[in-house]
Amino acid sequence: MIATRTRTWWQHFSAAGVLFALASCSSESIAPLQPVDDDEPGFVAGELTVYIANYDDGTADTRYFLKVAEGDERPLHFGAEPDLTPGARVKVWGTQRADKLVVAKYKLATEIASEGIGSQAQKSEVIDATVEPGRVMCAALVNIDNGTAKTTVASVKNSFHTGTGSVNNYYRENSFGAVGLAGDSYGPLTFTGFSGCNYNALGKAIKPMLDMASPVKCNQYAFVFGPGGGCGWSGLGAVGTSDKPAADTWYADSVSCVVAVQEPGHNYGMQHSSSITCSGGAFADTLTGCTHNEYGDKYDTMGGGCYHMNAWQKLYQKWFDGCNGVRTTSSGKFNLYPLEAPCNGVQVLQVPFPGAKTRSFQNTTLTSYYLELRTATGFDSKYGAPSVLVHAGGAPILPNSANPKGLHVWALAAGGTTWGLTAGKSFADPAGGLTITVDSVSTTNAVVDITYAAGSGNPVCLDGANTPFTAPGAADCTSPPPISDAAPPPVDVRTDTGAGGAAGTGIDAAGGTAGTGTAGAAGSGGASGAAGSGGAAGKAGSSGTGGSTAGSGGSTGGTGGTTGGSGGDTGGTGGTGTGGTGGDSGRGGSGATKPTTPEPLSGGCGCKVASSDPVTGARSSGLAMLGLIGLFGARRRNRRQRSS
């Protein structure tokens, strides 16, 4: 569970209006509520909405609401953190106390449709990851209560969209090119009635204006407001999941790296990256006496530093593919490659606690250590000498996990004051039975020795299919990982059909000598067509019979095969040959251009979170005074540009 604070901000709102209230969780001694199966009368149904507020003193609040059919959000109070996914349809039973519903029991109503930024399909490694269009982030700078924010529209745009250290570039680099932010920044707009941190009213007033100003549909919203406001936090984000992101984020006059990246991270379902301190060592067998630091992972933007997200978070977002993640429950040596760049090798090694042991900490069930190699690359440029970081976390999220809930994960000071393990350093499980040793480490890879006293089983890939894995793994980042003999054959997701003919441009098929045609699975030639030159580089089909008729662009095309004009490693010439065979690897003709891996970014960004004013003021009515003329003008210009 996350640290809680006593706040009176919710007292500024009425139950009939915009309802935001602190839904604090009690200590771990109170067991979480369990879902029920009955449908007795008296329930209230709606969508579970969750927000995380990040305070300047290193604490956070998690707030739960029930969005009912009318669109209002009713504050909920749980005795302990519920095992519910944000966005879930739920039925709750409880007692109304003031403007909060104290939940006695709940029932999950329906599963959540997936729509988001991760992937539920099994894929190959991320070195050739598909670059997806960015989610459209519409950001607004808002001057509140007749004041002027210290932030400017230019700095908002630079922070979210265009700067070298922007949120867009951060997510592009962290996701190996798969995720980014499109959109633009607008303002300054004005809003009065914010006193007492009336941020929800601000969002409701500004959001339609952003929708009107943006030439494309907004997927996410950033409301940067100032001066002051009395919120006490630097950022607030609605919590979604990696498959169904939430949309809204608020910023108290600060768009520095950590807060600007972290709030969209909550939209994507990520919890904070924390650290744990135990007496007598980096970890303990029993964690009841250990100390939790909410933002303690100083090498993670979901914690307290402007660095790459840790490996568990990347697993949760489904940014790793194939055998980029591996689990081992037995002894062996493994090649571990840097977390920061696309790679076909192992980038995260899950090492379960010995004897399938679990440990409970902050309402999270910990099952494993997660090892990752960090180097001074891109947003990790300030990291220093390469080392292997160790985190403790729950079960990993696999690519075929549907709409998973994010979890806390804790960094361990396994290597002492520098945290990371360097060459020759070891970390042992406090209960015994497991030792992790770094044999060697460099900027290109580390060799990690896992020693279980009573381990069993073979390593498997964290690909959702438990594909057997042969240690130590790939020899370098560009080599495919070695697969055990026990592994199922890899699935070739490419099509085996393509057009033969003049340029040999079909997918995975060589151009035929007798014209156009469709190359079948066995490498059959085209049916008919004009003569054309062969493709430049396709490989021959695996088998086939010779054509019965030589064609010079004739009416019948022979089937390609072992005789006739084969389209092999070099394409056949146009004119007299029979139909060329389609290859099942390589790309004929002009070929396809694979997505370009983004270059590592340099520089980074400042990570100091600007302080906010203390909680002040009483409840005021929300009255929007927005820059309608400018926004309507922008809308009209957008329309003229689209029509021209």
Image: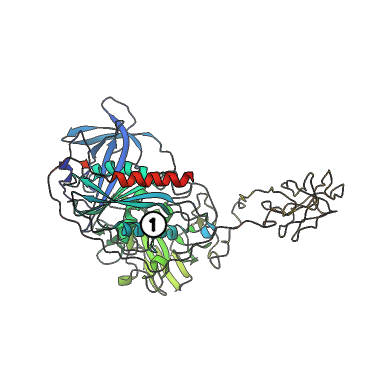
Percent across and percent down for residue 555 are 83, 43
Percent across and percent down for residue 88 are 36, 38
Q: Is residue 442 left or right of residue 85?
A: right
Residue 406 in view (yes/no): no
Residue 618 in view (yes/no): yes
Q: Residue at x 47, y 60 (%)?
A: 330
Q: Residue at x 50, y 59 (%)?
A: 324
Residue, far top: 41
For mark 1, does the 10 Å Cα neighbourhood hold few (<14), some (14 to 19), or many (20 or more) residues? Answer: many
Q: Is residue 354 left or right of residue 536?
A: left
In the depicted structure, whether residue 383 falls above or below residue 200: below
**Residue placed most toward the observer, 277 or 503:** 503
Percent across and percent down for residue 139 are 33, 51
Q: Which residue is mark 1?
A: 161
Percent across and percent down for residue 237 are 30, 49
**Residue placed most toward the observer, 518 or 438:** 518
The amino acid sitting under disc 1 is His
